[in-house]
């Protein structure tokens, strides 16, 4: 397995991490979670995900800081999809040049669809 | 009139002690004039005429002789003929203004030169040589009347006659009469000399003139702003004996014209004053405008700041509300998807989902309650329902709830077994819950949280102390402000409403809420409330304990 189904989920809300992990696992993805940007950056080399789902507002290294640092890590860079409760999700996504976005709260089917679009089975 | 050089000095010296005959002045100032007379006589006695060179010198000073009529009646006639096509008044105006200005300038210049020669500094002394020089140079004799008040200030007033005025004399000799006083140069010269002597602007006006048919040539000299007042006063004094005149000055036999030179000067002064006034007003208005501008700018920036705060609050509130909603919806959909696949979720998963749904909906409802409280507070509709309540009981209840969610914190209570106060129990519980939640939230690494409930006289004191991250000094003042979050960068959640609502509730109870920051770190929030209703405790403390 080359990480083709591996997803890294970065969100400070424990409850959100739980249900997303649950839902994506049900669909056959492998999901690792991190509660902030720093933990995510530490996990990436070892987990080598094919997709990163990223919350923006987090304590410590937030979504913006994570994106900045992630871009500076050696290639390849995998797609980043922003999951945000911000008023303008698209704006947040464009600020960090993300590959996709989903506004919270979202329909689970939309999440499944967007994940499949990037790393379809 | 050239006198032999020899003997002139001795003759003058002889005259000095005997009589003042080249000028007539009030008794009091005579001695000074005698001295001047002596000086001027000696000065004029040294006279050298040298037609081969074309010079006349007096005490070494060059003089010129002018034929008097050419500067008077003939000059007026000449100007009048030049101004034929215009009104006679205009010609007269041009001529007399010109003559006045020239004479005024000569008077000033002569005075200055004489003051230097005589080395005098007292104004009257400076004045004294003027009339005598006047006589010696053939302009006129000077007779200063006793009611004169030659003082070096605004009160300066001189009333004097010019017998043998070269100007009126020129008219009389031609058997000509004038409608207006003609002794313009006399007035100009004497006021010029006096102006120079007293160091203040002076104007002279001829109020009676031989050329107009008067009995004498009489003048009044005063500072320009006062001249009309003196003229009016003089005309009133003499109006009984005199016919009213055609000019604005009532009761004058002689129409009086105040030399335009001074009117011009006065107008300039007035203009300058009004200009200065205008500048002052402009300055004031500018200051006012700048102040108003400043106020506006401050208001705008305050409003802008308020807008930014509100905007930030909306972002935060949206985030705070959407986060639990995301979980609620997410867990529900995870379960539904599974059931849609005709699978039965296993018990651990069901329990996890249901617990999350329960917790998140509780969180959501707390946020909604806060938002409702805020709108009630803004509308002034938050009303207390007070009853005699055991505060210790409330605190224990809050602690019990908090302990389940704060495993890493040690929640400790110091309190009597009961403490009764007349308060709104739900609102007070809300305050204590908020304070305990904050204590836990802002000590993310755990540690003790101490609650202290006590009675201080007629007051109830509740203190909640944590040993957490505290509040930076520069943010301490704002922590009770609406929407304010001291630790936005930590993203510890919340809408920045807790302490604000707590403060409002405490204040509705006529109490105080304050923050203390112990040197060791952490935060202590202290609430003090009146126990109320005759110290609620008094009657029922025994029952409670």
Image (tube, rainbow, N blue to C red):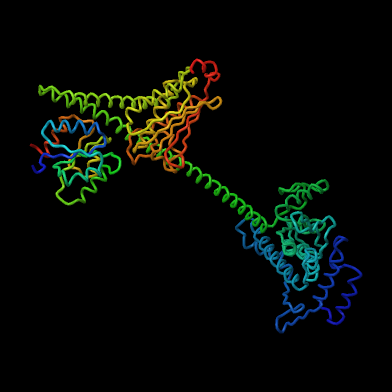
Residue B471 point in image, percent of width and height: 41, 40
Residue extending farthest right:
B18
Residue drawn at the location 81% of the way across and 68% of the way down: B132
Residue B41 point in image, percent of width and height: 83, 74
Which one is in front, A70 or A34? A34
Residue B149 in which image quadrant: bottom right
Q: Report the number of numbered marks.
A: 0
Seen in the picture, residue B228 relative to B19 is either above or below; the reply is: above
Residue drawn at the location 70% of the way across and 83% of the way down: B53
Task: Assign the N terminus of chain B to one quadrant of the image.
Answer: bottom right
Which one is in front, A14 or B176? A14
Residue extending farthest bottom:
B52
Which one is in front, B17 or B252? B17
Residue B369 point in image, percent of width and height: 36, 24
Residue B485 point in image, percent of width and height: 38, 37
Q: Is residue B75 left or right of residue B413?
A: right
Residue drawn at the location 78% of the way across and 79% of the way down: B47
Which one is in front, B396 or B233? B396
Q: Is residue A60 left or right of residue B502?
A: left
Residue B91 in which image quadrant: bottom right
Residue drawn at the location 77% of the way across and 63% of the way down: B123
Seen in the picture, residue B367 relative to B61 is either above or below; the reply is: above
Residue B429 in which image quadrant: top left
Seen in the picture, residue B112 relative to B289 is either above or below; the reply is: below
Q: Is residue A29 left or right of residue B75?
A: left
């Amino acid at each position: 397995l080359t990480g083709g189904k591996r997803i890294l989920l970065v969100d400070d809300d424990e409850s959100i991490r739980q249900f997303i992990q649950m839902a994506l696992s049900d669909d056959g993805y492998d999901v690792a979670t991190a509660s902030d940007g720093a933990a995510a950056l530490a996990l990436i080399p070892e987990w080598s995900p094919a997709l990163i789902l990223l919350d923006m507002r987090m304590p410590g290294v937030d979504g913006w800081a994570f994106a900045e640092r992630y871009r500076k890590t050696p290639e390849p860079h995998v797609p980043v999809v922003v999951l945000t409760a911000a008023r303008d999700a698209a704006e947040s996504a464009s600020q960090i040049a993300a590959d996709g976005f989903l506004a919270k709260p979202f329909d689970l089917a939309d999440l499944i669809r967007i994940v499949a679009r990037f790393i379809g089975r | 009139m050239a006198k032999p050089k020899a003997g002139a000095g001795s003759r003058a010296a002889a005259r000095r002690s005997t009589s003042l005959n080249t000028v007539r002045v009030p008794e009091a100032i005579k001695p000074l004039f005698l001295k001047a007379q002596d000086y001027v006589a000696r000065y004029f006695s040294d006279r050298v005429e040298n037609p081969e060179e074309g010079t006349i010198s007096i005490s070494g000073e060059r003089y010129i002789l002018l034929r008097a009529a050419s500067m008077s009646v003939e000059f007026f006639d000449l100007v009048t003929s030049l101004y034929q096509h215009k009104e006679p008044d205009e010609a007269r105006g041009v001529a007399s203004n010109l003559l006045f200005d020239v004479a005024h300038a000569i008077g000033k210049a002569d005075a200055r030169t004489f003051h230097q020669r005589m080395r005098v500094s007292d104004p009257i002394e400076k004045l004294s040589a003027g009339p005598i020089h006047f006589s010696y140079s053939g302009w006129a004799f000077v007779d200063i009347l006793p009611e004169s008040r030659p003082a070096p200030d605004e009160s300066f007033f001189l009333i004097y006659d010019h017998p043998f005025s070269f100007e009126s004399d020129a008219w009389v000799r031609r058997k000509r009469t004038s409608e207006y006083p003609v002794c313009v140069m006399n007035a100009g010269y004497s006021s010029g000399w006096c102006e120079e002597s007293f160091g203040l602007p002076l104007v002279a006006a001829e109020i009676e003139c031989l050329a107009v048919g008067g009995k004498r040539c009489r003048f009044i000299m005063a500072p320009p702003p006062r001249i009309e007042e003196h003229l009016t006063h003089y005309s009133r004094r003499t109006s009984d004996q005199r016919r009213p005149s055609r000019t604005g000055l009532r009761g004058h036999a002689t129409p009086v014209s105040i030399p335009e030179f001074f009117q011009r000067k006065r107008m300039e002064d007035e203009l300058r004053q009004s200009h200065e006034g205008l500048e002052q007003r402009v300055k004031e208005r500018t200051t006012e405008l700048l102040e108003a501008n400043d106020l506006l700018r401050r208001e705008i920036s305050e409003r802008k700041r308020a807008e930014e705060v509100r905007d930030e609050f909306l972002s935060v509130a949206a985030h705070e509300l959407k986060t639990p909603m995301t979980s609620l919806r997410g867990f529900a959909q995870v379960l539904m998807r599974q059931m849609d696949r005709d699978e039965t979720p296993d018990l651990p998963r069901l329990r996890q989902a249901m617990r999350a749904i329960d917790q998140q909906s509780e969180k959501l409802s707390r946020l909604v309650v806060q938002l409702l409280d805020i709108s009630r507070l803004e509308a002034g509709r938050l009303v207390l329902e007070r009853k005699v309540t055991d505060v210790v009981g409330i605190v224990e209840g809050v602690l019990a709830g908090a302990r389940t969610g704060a495993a890493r914190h040690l929640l400790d209570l110091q309190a009597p077994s009961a403490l009764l106060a007349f308060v709104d129990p739900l609102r007070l519980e809300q305050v204590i819950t908020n304070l305990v939640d904050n204590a836990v939230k802002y000590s993310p690494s755990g540690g003790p949280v101490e609650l202290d409930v006590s009675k201080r006289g007629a007051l109830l004191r509740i203190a909640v102390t944590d040993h957490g991250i505290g509040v930076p000094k520069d943010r301490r003042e704002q922590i009770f402000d609406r929407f304010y979050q001291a630790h936005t960068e930590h993203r510890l959640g919340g809408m920045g409403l807790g302490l604000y609502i707590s403060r409002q509730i405490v204040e509705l109870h006529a109490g105080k809420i304050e923050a203390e920051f112990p040197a060791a770190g952490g935060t202590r929030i202290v609430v003090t409330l009146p126990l109320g209703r005759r110290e609620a405790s008094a009657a029922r403390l025994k029952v409670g304990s």
